[in-house]
Every structure is written in C-alpha cells, then in structure tokens.
C-alpha cells in the first residue's frame, strides 16, 4: 500500500533530517519523522518527541507508545499495517516542554507535506498540542475528545487523549479517561470500516 507515497515522503524526510530552521536542531539526538505505514485511511499526529523517541528516531516508542499500540490493537489496528504516525514537531524540546510557536512554525512544512502526500481520511489528533495545531479553540482536550471535526483535504479529525495522560490516570471506571478512550477508538474503528 505504501509504495505510491514512498518517494515523496522520502524526499521530505531527507530535507527534514538536515533541518536547522529552529534551535531544537542543536539539542536533538535524532529527527523523529514517522512510524507505521502510509495509509490513506488513517493517520495519527502526536505532539513532540520525548526522550525515547529522540534516542530512537521514531515516534511513540516509550511507555506511552506501548500503551498506544495496545489501544490500537484492541480494535484490530496495527502500526505495522494500518496507521501512519507522526508528530507536530520532529525534534524533542528540552525537558519535554511544549513546543514554542516558532518551533511549530519551523516544522509545519514537514507536517503539512505528510498530510498532503498521504491525504488521510481520518486524522487522530493525539494530545493538546496536536489538537491546537489544527483546531482554533480555547477548549481543552477533555471537552474536544471523541468529537469529529472537519480536517484538511476533506478528512475527518478526532482529538484523543495522549497515552502519557492515560498512564497518569489509571482508573478504567465508566467516565474515566481510559474508559473514554475506549469509546473513542471504537468509534474510529466504526468510521474506518465504512471507508472505501
């Protein structure tokens, strides 16, 4: 499935790997470009690389990434088969702080290219930083999660909790973040299965 995208994505990745448009290039270990497989049906956009992602050069590889894989797996999604994963920015901010506006602006061309090349039908916006990169709102993720929004290239976007937030909120009781995430991922699977 991915061959139609490979050349274009590799061109953007090569440019991104040598990027020095903001100060994060000085402190990064690796550029964190993407994981998974290009799939015109489903894309997940996270916030920014953390320590483990910076070390490995791949998004969502620490404990949050392991939880994300379990969440996806519980409805039959696999990062090796079904989903393209990237972040709003491609280099780790020091101490895992939120990306600064100028850092997001410097990285925007790479994120836009990823979205434009793949043209996913569903985009999962994982965490507050990703949500606020695409949706102009003052509302927090708790009020936005689980709702569908109109996205680029006629896509549907759904804000979802970041797995690192779920790791800090262990309850699985009805109404808890983990319970809400389970409702959201089931809804994503339902809509995915209706796509051509």
Image (spheres, rainbow, N blue to C red):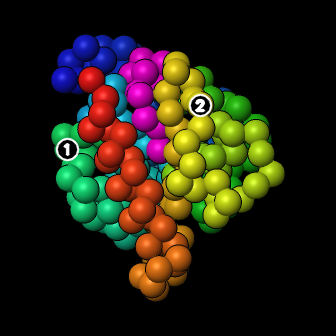
Residue 175 seen in the figure = yes
Q: Is residue 110 magenta?
A: no
Q: Position of residue 91 (x, y in %)?
A: 54, 45
- What residue sits right under mark 1 in the picture? 80
Span shown in magenta: 115-124
Q: Is residue 118 magenta?
A: yes
Q: Residues within 10 Å of mark 2 (few under 14, many from 20)?
A: some
Secondary element at tag 1: loop
**Residue 19 lies in what quarter of the image?**
top right
Residue drawn 34% across and 67% down? 67
Q: Please identify the quadrant where the N terminus is shown.
A: top left
Residue 34 seen in the figure = no
Query: Which one is closest to the eye, mark 1 or mark 2?
Result: 2
In the visual, does 9 lie left or right of 22?
left
Q: Residues within 10 Å of mark 1 (few under 14, many from 20)?
A: few
Q: Position of residue 127 (x, y in %)?
A: 57, 56
Q: Position of residue 106 (x, y in %)?
A: 67, 31
In the visual, does 125 lie left or right of 13?
right
- What residue sits right under mark 2 in the picture? 150
Q: Please identify the quadrant where the C terminus is shown.
A: top left
Secondary element at tag 2: strand
- Total numbered labels placed on residues in the image: 2
Residue drawn 39% across and 22% down? 118
């Amino acid at each position: 499935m991915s061959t139609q995208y490979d050349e274009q994505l590799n061109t953007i990745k090569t440019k991104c790997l040598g990027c020095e448009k903001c100060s994060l290039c000085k402190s990064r270990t690796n550029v964190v470009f993407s994981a998974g497989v290009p799939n015109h049906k489903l894309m997940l956009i996270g916030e920014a690389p953390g320590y483990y992602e910076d070390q490995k050069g791949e998004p969502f590889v620490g404990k949050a990434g392991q939880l994300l894989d379990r969440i996806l797996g519980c409805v039959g999604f696999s990062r090796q088969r079904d989903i393209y994963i990237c972040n709003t920015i491609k280099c780790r901010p020091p101490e895992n702080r939120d990306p600064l506006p100028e850092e997001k602006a410097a990285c925007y061309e790479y994120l836009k290219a990823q979205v434009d090349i793949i043209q996913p039908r569903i985009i999962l916006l994982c965490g507050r930083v990703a949500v606020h990169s695409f949706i102009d709102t003052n509302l927090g993720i708790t009020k936005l999660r689980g709702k569908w929004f109109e996205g680029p290239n006629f896509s549907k976007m759904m804000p979802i909790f970041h797995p690192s937030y779920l790791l800090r909120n262990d309850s699985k009781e009805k109404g808890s973040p983990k319970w809400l995430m389970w409702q959201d991922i089931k809804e994503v699977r339902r809509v995915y299965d209706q796509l051509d």
